Amino acid sequence: MNPFAGLRRTPLAWRQTSHRPMRLLAAIAGVSFANVLVFFQLGLACGLYASQKRPLQRLNGELVMVSRRYTNLGEPLNLPRSRLFQALGVQGVEAETPLYIGKTDWLNRDSREKSRP
């Protein structure tokens, strides 16, 4: 005796979905829209992470040192100069060049008004 024989005679799932076709279409549209939003958010997150990594990857150097508390370019943190001098003491390091990235206000020469880019 087949234990699934009763399921073939009573297509319960099909009856529930076909009973109200507009409700079925609304549910499918809602789930599809939620999926589009999730993939859109994933695309934005991947783009954000790539835009934060790209400047550091494009530097022409063999070693890039960043602060331990570094999270993103929008909130730059300085590395202590002592760390740079400490890196000069490592065998094979010929030179060090600090690169400071920060925020500043732009000053309009005509109106003397400050603005943030």
Image (spheres, rainbow, N blue to C red):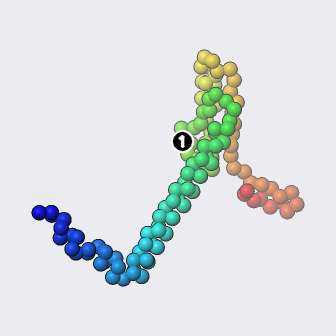
Drawn side of residue 26 relative to residue 7, left or right: right
- Which amino acid type is shown beneath numbered disc 1? Arg
Residue at image point 43% right, 77% down: 25
Q: Quadrant of residue 113?
A: bottom right
- Residue found at the far left of this picture: 1
Drawn side of residue 84 relative to residue 3, left or right: right
Q: Quadrant of the N terminus?
A: bottom left
Image vertical order of residue 7 relative to residue 98, above or below:
below
Foreground pick, 107 / 35: 35
Residue at image point 39% right, 81% down: 21
Foreground pick, 78 / 48: 48
Image vertical order of residue 26 relative to residue 46, above or below:
below
- The image shows residue 43 at horizontal and vertical percentages of 55, 56
- The image shows residue 49 at horizontal and vertical percentages of 57, 48
What is the crowding at mark 1: few (fewer than 14 residues within 10 Å), some, or many (at least 20)? few
Q: Quadrant of residue 112?
A: bottom right
Q: Where is mark 1, residue-wise? A: 69
- The image shows residue 92 at horizontal and vertical percentages of 63, 18
What is the count of numbered marks? Answer: 1
Drawn side of residue 40 relative to residue 1, left or right: right
Residue at image point 52% right, 56% down: 42
- The image shows residue 73 at horizontal and vertical percentages of 63, 47
Image vertical order of residue 17 relative to residue 114, above or below:
below
Foreground pick, 104 / 48: 48
Residue at image point 34% right, 76% down: 17
Drawn side of residue 21 relative to residue 6, left or right: right
Q: Quadrant of the C terminus?
A: bottom right
- Residue found at the far top of this picture: 91
- Residue found at the far right of this picture: 110
At numbered mark 1, what does the secondary structure look like: helix, strand or loop? loop
